[in-house]
Image (spheres, grey):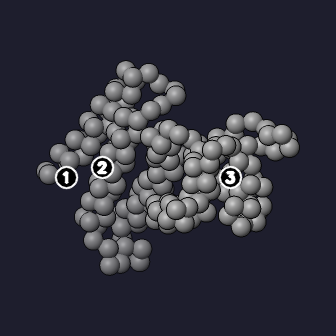
């Protein structure tokens, strides 16, 4: 089972070991420490340590204190919805900003002409930017729907409304 979940997690851009660790923590009847995970998965302590750091960053797993041996104990975060939205906020948002920045550089180069624009269709480069802005707006709207520790429901609906407004504006520009 852990290998199948690992395959699924890997498909979504994480490492297979992340899914394997999460599965063991999720189905375990008690919290596990890094040593337990090393033994169960037959992997090195270094790999477990790096993977735990990644999983903690996205709040996929949680530290729940120290065990009898004084080692840090972990459990899977049972709130899968919150986990998904954390990934969207922390990973996909960053990725979309990077894509948008690269497209802006490409658009500038294509509009200036010269060697940098050879073979580029400047209208398609601009259209690509519109598609990226639309995708980024949709991502922001989706994130606004999700659970958040730093805003109340009114703030979330206002953010969602602004994001959908931006998407609609871009779609109107595209059709002109």
Gap in angstroms between the C-alphas marked 1 and 3: 44 Å
Whether tag 2 and tag 1 are in contact, CB under 8 A, the answer is: yes
Sooner in the amino-acid sequence: mark 3 or mark 2: 3
Mark 2 vs mark 1, foreground winner is 2
Residue at 51% in and 51% down: 91
Whether tag 3 and tag 2 are in contact, CB under 8 A, the answer is: no
Task: Give the residue pinned by disc 3.
Answer: 52
Percent x, y for residue 158?
A: 34, 26
Q: Is residue 48 visible?
A: no
Q: From this view, report whether residue 131 is shown above or below residue 163.
A: below
Left or right side of 176 for 17: right
Out of 147 and 72, give the one closest to the viewer: 72
Sooner in the amino-acid sequence: mark 2 or mark 1: 2
Out of 66 and 102, give the one closest to the viewer: 66
The residue sitting at the left extreme is: 176
Element type where label 3 sits in the image? helix
Sooner in the amino-acid sequence: mark 1 or mark 3: 3
Percent x, y for residue 49?
A: 74, 56
Gap in angstroms between the C-alphas marked 2 and 1: 10 Å
Residue at 70% in and 36% down: 64
Percent x, y for residue 121?
A: 27, 71
Task: Give the residue pinned by disc 1.
Answer: 174
Q: From this view, report whether residue 124 is shown above or below residue 59.
A: below
Res 154 → quadrant: top left
Mark 1 vs mark 3, foreground winner is 3
Element type where label 1 sits in the image? helix
Circle on res. 134 = 2
């Amino acid at each position: 089972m852990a290998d199948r979940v690992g395959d699924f997690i890997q498909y979504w851009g994480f490492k297979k070991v992340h899914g394997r660790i999460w599965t063991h923590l999720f189905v375990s009847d008690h919290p596990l420490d890094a040593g337990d995970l090393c033994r169960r998965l037959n992997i090195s302590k270094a790999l477990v340590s790096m993977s735990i750091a990644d999983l903690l960053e996205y709040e996929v797993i949680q530290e729940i204190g120290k065990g009898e041996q004084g080692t840090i104990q972990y459990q899977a975060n049972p709130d899968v919805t919150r986990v998904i939205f954390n990934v969207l906020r922390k990973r996909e948002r960053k990725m979309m900003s990077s894509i948008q920045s690269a497209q802006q550089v490409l658009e500038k180069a294509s509009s200036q002409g010269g060697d940098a624009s050879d073979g580029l269709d400047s209208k398609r480069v601009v259209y690509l930017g519109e598609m990226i802005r639309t995708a980024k707006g949709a991502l922001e709207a989706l994130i606004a729907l999700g659970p958040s520790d730093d805003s109340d429901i009114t703030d979330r609906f206002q953010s969602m409304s602004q994001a959908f407004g931006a998407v609609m504006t871009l779609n109107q520009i595209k059709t002109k």
